[in-house]
Amino acid sequence: MAYSNEVRDSFSKELDGIREAGLFKEERWIKSPQAADIEVEFPAGAEGKKVINFCANNYLGLSNHPDVVEAARIGLGTRGYGLSSVRFICGTQDIHGHLEHRLTEFLGTEDTLLFPSCMDANAGVFEAILGDQDIMIADRLVHASIVDGMRLCKAMRDTYKHSNMEHLEEKLQDHQDKRIRLIITDGVFSMDGDLAKLDEIVALAEKYDAMVFVDDSHASGFIGKTGRGTHEHCGVLSQIDIITTTLGKALGGASGGCVSGRKELVELCRQRARPYLFSNTVAPVIVSGAIKVLDLVSATTERRDKLEWNTKFWRDGLVKMGLDIKAGDSPIVPVMLYNAKLAQDMARDLYEEGIYVVGFFFPVVAKGQARIRTQLSAAHDQHHLEKGLEAFAKVADKYGILGKSKKEIKEMYGL
Ligand SMILES: *Cc1c(COP(=O)(O)O)cnc(C)c1O
């Protein structure tokens, strides 16, 4: 056996190292559908506890919407459970085409290609369209899946400081000798909830003859007046060359992703993107559910408007009680605690109070930037938010940080 005791010990030590560094991740088992009110089993096997969820990407509350569930059921009944094929062999049904068409309309692009996930879309898109005479210039805080996708592509790579337009401009000047310049950014950055300055990015792209790529996973469905995304919010709706996004967050929350944008670029992905060519097609239940999601988000802005209201109520409440949050309008609301242990301890106490939140610390965020990231949903009603605020006030008071500045929190708890 090659898996000798020595090999086993060395892997065990690595795991111990992860534990000792306080970075070990444990799953919590949810015994109910995704919603504002969920029942959680933690640790696994323990008795279920009813908590209010403040850490899902269920921004529009559609993860268990009855119409979406019913549409998924119809998809299951009429198109079956699975296709046992990749798309280009015998894995494309009419509904895949319909969904791609609907996404194109919603995102305001020219064409769309579905992927099993946005992680897969990002893994495939760069390699499919760029070669070794081209340069990818990415914001330093882009999502891990973009970093991986860039690694798989033979084009040259560079980065610019997070949302720093002067730095991006310098880089664009530096790379004028390349064949294609592709600026790469998230639309909404998941850890701080801040929006990319897409209007300025598009202007720079025009000035320096570059293309623009946006991953709008934390925006599609609810950012912008009609929820189309960060490009709508920034007034550059038809000017983004490539958008990738997920169906796994606001748009139903099941799974699936896409590349959407210029017709030729999407077609190149259909010909070459490896996760599209070599991974199974998105299941009919999900496709059918996602079409219903697009019906719902296209018919009314009620859910995104409620989310906006909830976000404002929550942000105002946290600021009023004297907690330090990252400013902005997005439903990602990080409560800054700076110290990793404090973030973990408070998240645990909040859980005891019936509030499900998670502490984030290095390496997910920079050292000394630990936080509890809260996320709002249109599924929250005012009583959920009030109970959440009450619990935050109680727990923050226990740790003596109400009204305390960043400097004071750092003095009390260190880093
Ligand atoms: C969540 C997320 C992804 C991954 O999406 P999946 O469809 O779950 O693979 C990719 N990019 C960004 C920016 C994300 O937030």
Image: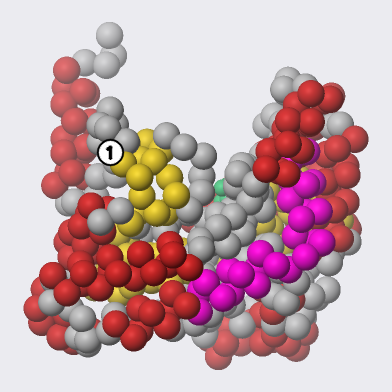
Total labels: the figure holds 1
Q: Secondary structure at mark 1?
A: loop
What secondary structure is the stretch in magenta mostly built from?
A: helix
Q: Amino acid at mark 1?
A: Phe
Q: Quadrant of the N terminus?
A: top left
Q: What is the magenta range?
A: 288-312
Task: Please state, as top left, top right, bottom left or bottom right, where the C terminus lies in the image.
Answer: bottom left
- Depth check, front residue: 97 or 312: 312
Magenta stretch encompasses residue 308: yes
Q: Quadrant of residue 79?
A: top right
- Residue for point 20% across, 67% down: 395
Query: In the picture, residue 4 is in which quadrant?
Result: top left
Task: State the colouring used for the structure image.
Answer: secondary structure
Residue 386 pos. (x, y %): 39, 69
At horizontal 13% and vertical 77% (from top left) the residue drawn is 400
Give the image location of residue 172, x and y in percent. Answer: 64, 82
Residue 323 at least partly seen: yes
Q: Position of residue 393 (x, y in %)?
A: 25, 73
Q: Position of residue 180 (x, y in %)?
A: 74, 69
Q: Which residue is painted at 51% across and 39% down in the image?
A: 33
Examine the rendered structure and indicate whether residue 243 appears above or below residue 291. Answer: below
Residue designated by label 1: 42
210 with respect to 330 (left or right): right
Residue 86 visible in rendering: no
